[in-house]
Amino acid sequence: MNQNRRILLKSTLTAGATGLAISAGLLTPKSVLAAWPKAAFEAKDANTALKAALGSSNVIESKDIKLKAPKIAENGASVTVTVTSKIVNTESISIIIAENNMPLAATFNLSKTTKGTVTTRVKIGKSSDVTAVVKAEGKLYSTSRNVKVTIGGCGG
């Protein structure tokens, strides 16, 4: 019997059995599924999003948070934002974009051994304040920066 034929048959049977097990729910990646705060990401305003994601919308302005984002974004579809927290025991860092249809852009839950810095790309639909919210020891701290989104880089 042709060796390639055996390999093909064995691979097909293995793939079929694996597909059957997945569809039957016998193989599910339960340990890798992230928690999904649906209400927070579906909120239509920043305060509701914060309350749903972090349990409160009461924030304290802090100079211990550095928010790096461009003053002018020529392409609002991909804007790089970096948040650095020097607040002791930083638990999470969230990014809120007030004028987006869904203001909560991201929430990063950090472990105690993680350095309080995150960098990500976000979509900014139109010129808006970008706010970094840091949760530490049950309190919320924030800093903001206005990002102007231009249309085609023409300052519109």
Image (cartoon, helix red, strand yellow):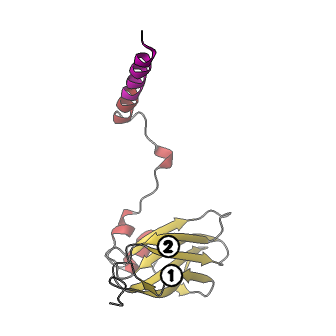
Residue 9: in magenta span? yes
Which element type, helix, strand or loop, lies under badge 2?
strand
Q: CA distance from mark 1 to mark 2?
A: 14 Å
**Mark seen at residue 94:** 2
Give the answer, above or below, for where 31 lies relative to 145.
above
For the residue marked with disc 1, what is the amino acid? Ala
Give the magenta part as a residue range.
1-16
Give the amino acid at mark 2.
Ser
Where residue 148 sits, quadrant-wise, is: bottom left
Secondary element at image label 1: loop
Q: Nearer the viewer, residue 68 or 34?
A: 68
Task: Answer whether residue 47 is magenta in the image.
Answer: no
Q: Which mark is residue 69?
A: 1
Q: Residue 56: horizontal and vertical position, in percent?
A: 46, 76
Residue 74: percent from the left, percent from the top?
40, 82
Q: Residue furthest top?
A: 1
- Front residue of this view, candidates 30 and 124: 124
Tell me what residue is drawn at x 47 percent, y 88 percent: 71
Relative horizontal placement of residue 114, taking residue 108 as reference (left or right): right
